[in-house]
């Protein structure tokens, strides 16, 4: 039988491990102890490494991911670079030299205890090699979040440091230049990423399968509807690490070509369920403004580099952030099973707490979003932190106006019921009404009554209700001519 391998820092390594071994543990067992475990739930970035991901058919994008969440076997045949490999690989020069991002971190005091540093340098390196950064590196300070070298600090939003303070880290990020011509990791971007390999590993208590095709996946899933599907593992990995889930059969769907297409047609965009949120963000390039608002508010860049729409809707969490947005966009889901495909409006998909209309053996193949997008839209995620936090309440609104009259409006809500819901009473009140302050006030009061919010550790029911009301008033203010009101975002 062929050896199972992956390439780490340019070396081929055997990966004969149990499906329960995480990528982080595997790397550390190989002596690559730079990547650390801080939280084991995707929150701190101490475990970040770089992976070679497809950037179109022919190119590679160095992408930072959390190694604490996915099984090592999910990376069979793939190419990984850790903080140790960064120091050796690129145009920094000789073996043992520091990579430019490591050099700047050292020079500017970006590391004290060093626990977070390997993770930070991997996230920084991904941004260092982001092809679009070169275009933004014009020597001008763009904002407090994008440096004169085009470095977008959001690349580091999934990395926490508890002792250095972020100022020196930011200084280091804004000081790195562009990759030099002899930089091997930069050159690697012009070649295709490694293709996915079919994987099948059986041990005493578990089985991991990466099927070669959608047909094979659906066949296996029909026979074993109890199997756990895994895409980015940002939910499943937390279940495994924190709640000790040990699924006896895991079916990997993340690299199936049929789940990784992004088709923009005249009437709709179809988003493959296994594309990562970062890939969708990049591929859509702002075509759907409401999705564009969702992306930066969804977890961190590290998580978005793995998380998928299929996983977010697959868990059917009432506080998942994609559902309210996709409800406001009137999205439909393409569900596939061995029997064939069917299309279900997202509004009919959720049937109860983490329950859906998905039948045994059925997966989400794609999400369809009708075009053109509404004239006005907004996504309000109310959480304790602005970034990388779980929603207490989420409100997505998409509205078309005909003059001053509301021609059409769709409102999706999260965090106010056992499932994500559409605010149909508010939609009804608004449709055909004049879009003025009085209507907005009436609609806000109606919206406050939609859903059945609960008290929990994140927020009280009263707070959630108040946030519903405020969101609609805020949306009204934001859709007024610019001189009317400047709303702090
Ligand atoms: C630190 C952190 C921050 C997070 N922040 C947010 C946030 O801000 N907003 C938010 O909404 N979520 C957040 N999440 C949750 C998670 O990232 C998302 O739910 C993500 O979209 C899951 O996608 P995945 O591909 O990683 O799913 P996986 O973990 O791979 O899969 C989760 C489950 O989804 C199902 N599934 C996967 N693919 C399919 C498919 N194609 N068809 C049917 N079922 C499928 C399976 O049942 C699987 O068990 C966060 C998670 C972490 C760890
Ligand atoms: S250990 Fe904290 S994100 Fe992985
Ligand atoms: S340097 Fe100590 S946690 Fe960041």
Image (cartoon, grey):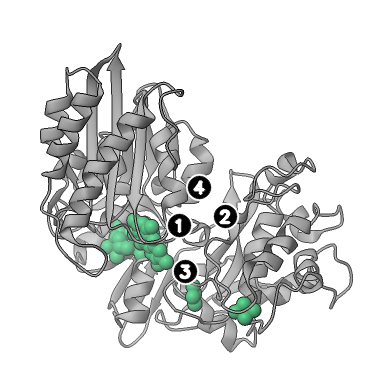
Judging from the image, what secondary structure is the residue with disc 3 in?
A: helix
Location of mark 1 (residue): 387
Q: Position of residue 463 (x, y in %)?
A: 22, 56
Q: CA distance from mark 4 to mark 2?
A: 16 Å
Secondary element type, mark 1: loop
Write down the residue under mark 3: 74
**Mark 4 C-beta closer than 8 Å to ligand 1:** no
**Pointer 4: what residue?**
279
Q: Are marks 3 and 4 in contact (CB under 8 Å)?
A: no
Query: Residue 270 location in percent, x, y?
Result: 37, 36
- Between tags 3 and 4, which lies in front? 4
Direction from residue 334 to residue 149 in the image, left or right: right
| Number of numbered callouts drawn | 4
Q: Quadrant of residue 80?
A: bottom right
* Label whose residue precedes the other's in the sequence (2 or 1): 2
Is the shortest distance between ligand 1 and the CB of mark 3 under 8 Å?
no
Q: Tell me what residue is drawn at x 19 percent, y 62 percent.
A: 460
Q: CA distance from mark 3 to mark 4?
A: 18 Å
Name which residue lies at 45% across and 82% down.
21
* 154 relative position to 171: left or right: left
Between the residue at mark 2 and the residue at mark 3, the CA separation in whole angstroms equals 26 Å
For mark 4, give the secondary structure: helix
Q: Nearer the viewer, mark 1 or mark 4?
A: 1
Q: Earlier in the sequence, mark 1 or mark 4?
A: 4
Residues at marks 2 and 1 touching, judged by CB atoms closer than 8 Å: yes
- Residue that badge 2 annotates: 154
**Image height of 423 relative to 274, above or below:** above
Q: CA distance from mark 1 to mark 4?
A: 19 Å
Q: Residues within 10 Å of mark 3 (few under 14, many from 20)?
A: many
- Single out the mark in the foreground, 3 or 1: 1
> Which circle's residue, 3 or 4, is located before the other in the chain?
3
Which comes before the other along the chain, label 2 or label 3?
A: 3
């Amino acid at each position: 039988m062929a050896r199972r391998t992956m390439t780490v820092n340019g070396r081929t390594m055997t990966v004969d491990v149990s499906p329960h071994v995480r990528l982080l543990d595997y790397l550390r067992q190989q002596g690559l102890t730079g990547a650390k475990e801080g939280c084991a739930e995707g929150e701190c970035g101490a475990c970040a490494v770089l992976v070679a991901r497809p950037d179109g058919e022919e190119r590679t994008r160095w992408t930072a991911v959390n190694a604490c969440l996915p099984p090592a076997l999910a990376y069979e045949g793939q190419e990984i670079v850790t903080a140790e490999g960064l120091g050796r690989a690129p145009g920094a020069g000789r073996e043992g030299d520091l990579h430019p991002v490591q050099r700047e971190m050292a020079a500017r005091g970006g590391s004290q205890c060093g626990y977070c540093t390997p993770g930070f340098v991997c996230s920084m390196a991904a941004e260092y090699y982001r092809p679009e950064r070169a275009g933004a590196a014009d020597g001008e300070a763009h904002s407090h979040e994008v440096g004169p070298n085009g470095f977008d600090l959001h690349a580091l939003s999934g990395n926490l440091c508890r002792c250095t303070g972020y100022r020196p880290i930011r200084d280091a990020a804004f000081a790195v230049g562009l990759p030099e011509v002899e930089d091997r990791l930069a050159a690697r971007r012009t070649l295709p990423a490694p293709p996915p390999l079919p994987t099948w590993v059986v041990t005493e208590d578990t089985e991991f399968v990466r099927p070669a095709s959608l047909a094979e996946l659906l066949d296996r899933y029909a026979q074993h509807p109890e199997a756990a599907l895994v895409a980015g593992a940002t939910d499943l990995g937390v279940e495994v690490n924190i709640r000790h889930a040990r699924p006896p059969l895991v079916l990997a769907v993340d690299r199936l070509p049929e789940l990784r297409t992004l088709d923009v047609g005249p009437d709709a965009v179809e988003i493959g369920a296994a594309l990562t949120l970062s890939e969708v963000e990049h591929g859509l390039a702002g075509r759907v403004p409401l999705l564009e608002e969702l992306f930066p508010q969804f977890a961190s860049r590290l998580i978005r580099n793995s998380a998928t729409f299929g996983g977010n809707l697959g868990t059917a969490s009432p506080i998942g952030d994609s559902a309210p947005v996709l409800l406001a966009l009137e999205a439909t889901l393409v569900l596939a099973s061995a029997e064939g495909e069917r299309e279900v409006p997202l509004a009919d998909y959720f049937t109860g707490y983490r329950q859906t209309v998905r039948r045994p053996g059925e997966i989400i193949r794609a999400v369809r979003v009708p075009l053109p997008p509404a004239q006005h839209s907004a996504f309000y995620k109310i959480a304790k932190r602005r970034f990388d936090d779980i929603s207490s309440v989420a409100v997505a609104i998409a509205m078309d106006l005909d003059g001053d009259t509301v021609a059409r409006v769709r409102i999706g809500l999260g965090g106010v019921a056992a499932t994500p819901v559409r605010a149909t009473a508010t939609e009804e009140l608004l449709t055909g009404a004049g879009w003025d302050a009085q209507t907005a006030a009436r609609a806000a009061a109606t919206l406050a009554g939609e859903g059945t919010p609960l008290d929990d550790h994140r927020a009280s029911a009263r707070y959630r209700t108040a946030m519903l009301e405020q969101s609609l008033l805020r949306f009204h203010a934001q859709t007024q001519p610019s001189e009317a009101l400047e709303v702090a975002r």
